Image (cartoon, rainbow, N blue to C red):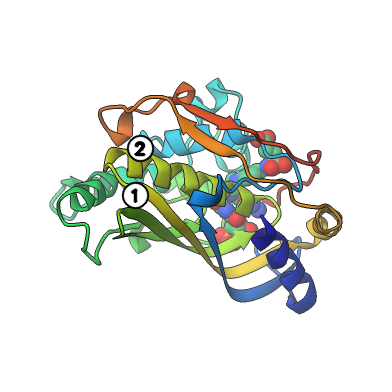
Amino acid sequence: MRQYLDLLQHILDNGFDKGDRTGTGTKSVFGYQMRFNLQDGFPLVTTKKLHTKSILHELLWFLKGDTDIGYLKQHGVRIWDEWATEDGRIGPLYGKQWTAWQKPDGDTINQIEEVIQTLKTNPNSRRMIVSAWNPADLPDESIAPQANVQQGRMALAACHAFFQFYVAGGKLSCQLYQRSADTFLGVPFNIASYAFLVHMIAQQCDLDVGEFVWTGGDVHLYNNTIEQAKLQLTREPMPLPKLVIKRKPDSIFDYQFDDFEIVGYESHPHIKATVSV
Ligand SMILES: Nc1nc(=O)c2c([nH]1)NC[C@@H]1CN(c3ccc(C(=O)N[C@@H](CCC(=O)O)C(=O)O)cc3)CN21
Ligand SMILES: O=c1ccn([C@H]2C[C@H](O)[C@@H](COP(=O)(O)O)O2)c(=O)[nH]1
């Protein structure tokens, strides 16, 4: 994961000091791209230990169309706790937009299902896109996440907002546009999550995996994660692990946690950081 270390260094060298919604303050650059050839291994950061269980449960939760943190809590995943209402809701975020985008006529669109259908029938299409960026459901930045949810809006505006698939030479690639990127805590999760998703969709469509291209907008290191980023830069990356999917479920919506095994994940120790809310 040299690409990730290069990004940390790039922000330290070129980042502007920039205030932000959470009040923590950041070092920030605008626009950055990383490419991961998924044939080279599964892109899990190795210069700190990642909690893959949280990443995979979160993705399976999105695919369920679920926006209630009950499922995450049941599995001991706490990464959405700070943004949920007391009764566990985060509003119409990823799960809702991916699988049940609201149409004006009352019907809904399952964007994941449609993309898979197109991949199977017309893989040359240049329109294989999923958008979580639904302006009608965006929160008001000046009030708390929970207050937005009470008004029927997203707790946070979608960060991994828009992704596109591409097929060439029998391989499935995906590019994500992430409008806002917490490079220390969020980005390692986001890269691994989309890598899981590409493997799952490739299996469903009988394709090999190609590249995951990560494109970031406001790419920042919160000021309370700068020392942690520097510590990571003193560590040598290790060889990437491999992902094994043990079964081919009937649909993208039928995967279970136990279907996945990460083989050979070696990493340096975990590094603690406080998430900015
Ligand atoms: N500031 C901020 N950064 C984010 O990455 C982020 C948000 N807010 N809000 C919404 C979601 C929630 N996500 C999160 C939230 C917390 C961790 C986190 O604390 N990670 C720790 C512990 C992981 C665990 O317990 O599983 C880590 O060390 O990676 C990661 C992603 C990603 N998103
Ligand atoms: O999947 C995610 C979700 C969130 N983030 C980060 C990016 C920002 O640091 C915050 C969101 O704050 P905004 O003010 O809405 O930009 O969360 C992430 O990196 N990955």
Q: Quadrant of the N terminus?
A: bottom right
Which residue does the image show at 55% across and 44% down from the upper left? 42
Residue toward you, 103 or 222? 222
The amino acid on which the numbered mark 2 sits, given as a three-letter code, is Gly
Residue 145 image offset from top left, x and y in percent? 55, 49
Which corner quadrant of the figure contains ligand 2?
bottom right
SS assignment at label 1: helix
- Provide residue 63's location: percent of width, then percent of height: 37, 38
Choose between 152 and 51: the one closer to the eye: 51
Q: Is residue 133 visible to the viewer in this orientation of the structure?
A: no
| Circle 1: residue type | Gln
On the image, the x and y values in percent for residue 125 come to 21, 63
Residue that carries the numbered disc 1 in the rendered image: 97
Q: Residue at x 83, y 52 (%)?
A: 235
Disc ID at residue 65: 2
Q: Is residue 241 above or below residue 143?
A: above
Could you tell me which residue is drawn at 68 percent across and 66 percent down? 7
Residue 179 falls left or right of residue 223: left
Q: CA–CA distance between discs 2 and 1?
A: 8 Å
Disc 2: residue Cβ within 8 A of ligand 2's nearest atom: no
Does 8 sit left or right of 154 as displayed?
right
